[in-house]
Amino acid sequence: MALGTVIRSFAAPTTKGRGLTFDGRTLWHVEDEDNLIHQIDPETGKDIRSFASPAVANQGLTFDGRYLWCVGYTDNLIHQIDPETGKDIRSFASPAVAARGLTWDGRCLWNANDIEDLIYQIDPATGKMIRSIQAPATSGRCLTFDGRTLWIADSITNIQYQLEILTGTIIRSFASPAVSPGGLAWDGRTLWYADYNTNLIYQIDIG
């Protein structure tokens, strides 16, 4: 299949879904308005369970192999969450002025800012910003890491960009399947894209 081809889609269990992540078996998706984090079966789209998010106006969601991390747009706080209990373990301030997408690279967190057009690398132990790279467009909303590179979906250009992680250089890009990006996730083979306007979650081939 060609880059950006939609493999399939299903209805999200949310009405204003934002962050999206994959834990190796299931998807997790967070609701902006009712502040619920949903665990989803990627094969059926079934909502397995949900619990309250500690973040305010949820935007980004990621999984580090053990814990979920969620960021709120209103208070710019990044929360570490136990996915088994939903317990808010701790939180710290994001360096972003308007925190959006969040992802994990195996060692550090990355958080997108759609006002300053920057993507921040963050030490999860201290919350300290390590460095930043320039986003490729002016409204980067969603972020994920594929084991080597970053992907970011922009809500103005409606394009998803693959970025070199050290410099932010654009490797390639394609048009999003919808115009209101809410979340991006990587499952080891394909991208997953959540749209908060269509309320659909799309599985996307990247070649």
Image: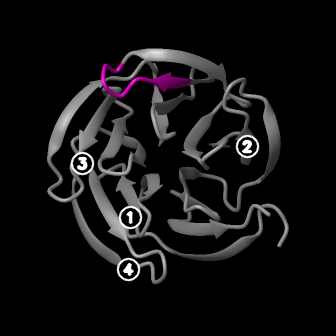
Tell me the CA gap for discs 3 and 1.
13 Å
Amino acid type of the residue tagged 2 in the rendering? Gln
Tell me the CA gap for discs 4 and 3.
19 Å
Q: Which residue is more in the foreground, 70 or 167?
A: 167
**Image quadrant assignment for residue 167:** top right
Of the two numbered discs 4 and 1 on the same chain, state the one appearing first in sequence.
1
Residue named by callout 3: 53
Residue named by callout 1: 14
Q: Which residue is more in the foreground, 180 or 144?
A: 144
Q: Is residue 203 magenta?
A: no
Where disc 2 sits, the SS reads strand
Q: Is residue 123 magenta?
A: yes
Left or right of 70? Residue 20 is right
What mark, if any, has residue 162 been given in the picture?
Answer: 2
Work out which quarter of the rendered image holds the C terminus and state it.
Answer: bottom right
Amino acid type of the residue tagged 4 in the rendering? Lys
Q: Nearer the viewer, mark 1 or mark 2?
A: 2
Proximity of marks 4 and 3: CB atoms separated by less than 8 Å: no
Residue 6 coordinates in the image, percent (x, y):
71, 71
Q: Nearer the viewer, mark 3 or mark 1?
A: 3
Work out which quarter of the rendered image holds the N terminus and state it.
Answer: bottom right
What mark, if any, has residue 46 been given in the picture?
Answer: 4
Proximity of marks 2 and 3: CB atoms separated by less than 8 Å: no
Where disc 1 sits, the SS reads loop
Residue 73 coordinates in the image, percent (x, y):
39, 33
Q: Nearer the viewer, mark 4 or mark 1?
A: 4
Of the two numbered discs 3 and 1 on the same chain, state the one appearing first in sequence.
1
